[in-house]
Amino acid sequence: MLKILKNFRWQYWVLAVVMVAFIVLQVELDLALPEYMSEIIALITIPGSTMEQVWQAGFKMIGISFGSLLCTVVTSFIAARIAAGFGAILRKKIFDKVESFSLEEINKFSTASLITRCTNDVQQILMFITIGLRLLITAPIMAGGAIIKISGKSSELTTITMIGVAVIVVFVVILTLVVMPKFRAIQRLTDNLNNVTRENLTGIRVVRAYNAEGFEEQKFDEVNQKITKTHLFVNRVMSLMHPMMQIVMNGLSLSITWVGATLINANKLTLPVMMSFNMYSMQIVMSFMMLIMVFIFMPRASVSAKRINEVLDTPNSISNPQNPVSANDKKGVVEFKNVSFKYADADECMLKDISFVANKGETVAIIGSTGSGKSSLLSLIPRFYDVTEGQVMVNGIDVKEQNLADLRDKIGYVPQKAILFSGTIESNLRFGNENADKDLLQKAVDIAQATNIVQAKGFTGNVAQGGQNLSGGQKQRMSIARAIAKQPEIYLFDDSFSALDYKTDKLLRQALNKEVSDATKIIVAQRIGTIKNADKILVLDKGKIVGNGTHQQLLQNCEVYREIAQSQLSKEELENA
């Protein structure tokens, strides 16, 4: 928890100091009330006292009460301000940290877990700051002040009060030890609940197509029941606190009154002292009730703080070099030198000894069976992952030695699964180039064969989250247009034409070759028709390059490529290729 609080900015530390000052003032006022109550009782019992004196003491009590109320309001306002501001800082830090993660770190945490940590876990911290932190300061000061006030007045009553406090402390410690593991389980189960919900909403079409609503409901119900049972267990255990506190408070009050009456009869104590002692003992118990509230919030906040720190403390496997190398005169050159790559949780390399060069203006295609490492190879160029062995060079410089932003500015990446963002068509096209004018956007749309989409919706047309209001082919064309609008030196197409019909595929490739002929294009594809006119075709099989050449050359000397071609093209098409 203390590690999380280090993210406070100096403004909030100043507010915290002011809050503590108001808390101390409030406690001082509250501690003064029993003295004035004792004074009123003394005035009533002492012969010769006037009602005017009683009223004066009463008005002082009312003034102190209003002062305490004002301090409470100000303290609550400051605590809420600190919590809101700190929450904004904490969410920003988590988001920025996740943004800096490579795919390796993102795969370590599930998407649902990262969302929970950024929302639910942060909320638990804020609840602790708003309520728990204030009570954590108030309770010790009030308890300490009340103990000082009663000390020396009656050893018998002091002993009774300390016994009551000891009972409360033991009870709270036992309950905390019981519920702490359950709080950890609740946050983990919340991750699972979010994961099941997100998975169901994302795949709702498949669920409905297979009439699998019952299966999904059962899966959700299992997770829901687990988190419900855990919550019930925690609430049942915590519900024991209130009756226990009532028993202790009432028992303590009864004991003080009984013993105090005995002492009064023995002339060892006066009635005003007993009444003030009773009120101070109640303040001590109330202080421990406040601490109980803290113990209710602290375990969950502590678990949440640990989960947030797991994200913030995760080291980035991919980061900017300390002394990045500046770009040279080369443009659009990609070279792989004896590259091998293995995923962090894998036993064997996905890619083995990959070497090739893609020169400026060339179209280099990569083809191979499913799982042969095509997408993995492509992801090494923008450093989504780092190579295990060898070097990936862009413009003659190792990508590990280049500034990440500069490296990725050179690249227009179109992923295997087309991703669009909620907003407008124009905002999506400007995603990689905020300064693109309408002429450039229109040119990019025309090259990507997405003109009909813009004509139908306009540049201000709405795009739903994930592009759900567009078809698969429309999303692919919009993703390609977005990359073109960036005007990069290097295009990376990761099977980005799979949802296009053959005619659109052909027209798009022709437009690319004509309009962006100076840019290097590296294309991962499954269709021979998409890549047969490439300047160079790499054939991958089990992570190795087993063929490198043109379409005609590979038909002659690469069995793997020939088998793929024969499975897609007729004999006549092969002969006329």
Image (cartoon, rainbow, N blue to C red):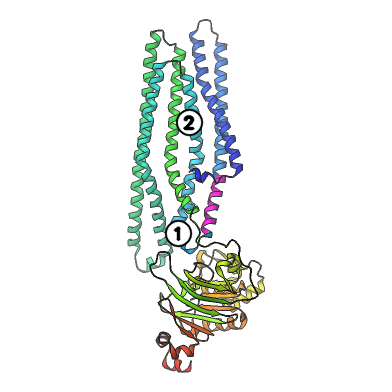
Where 11 sits versus 30, above or below?
A: below
Q: Read off the residue under disc 1.
A: 111
Q: As shown in the figure, which amino acid type bears the numbered disc 2?
A: Ala
Left or right, 110 with respect to 331, comes to left
Residue 360 located within the stretch drawn in magenta = no
Residue 94 located within the stretch drawn in magenta = yes
Q: Read off the residue under disc 2.
A: 139
Judged by its main secondary structure, the magenta piece is helix
The residue positioned farthest toward the top in the image shown? 48
**x, y percent for residue 421:** 54, 65
Q: Which residues are magenta?
A: 84-98
Q: As shown in the figure, which amino acid type bears the numbered disc 1?
A: Thr
Where 513 sits versus 201, above or below?
A: below
Decide which of 309, 318 is in the foreground and name it. Answer: 318
Decide which of 531, 546 is in the foreground and name it. Answer: 546
Q: Secondary structure at mark 2?
A: helix
N-terminal label among 2 and 1: 1
Which numbered circle lies on residue 59?
none
Question: At 45% across and 37% down in the image, what residue appears?
Answer: 294
User: Is residue 499 visible to us here?
Assistant: no
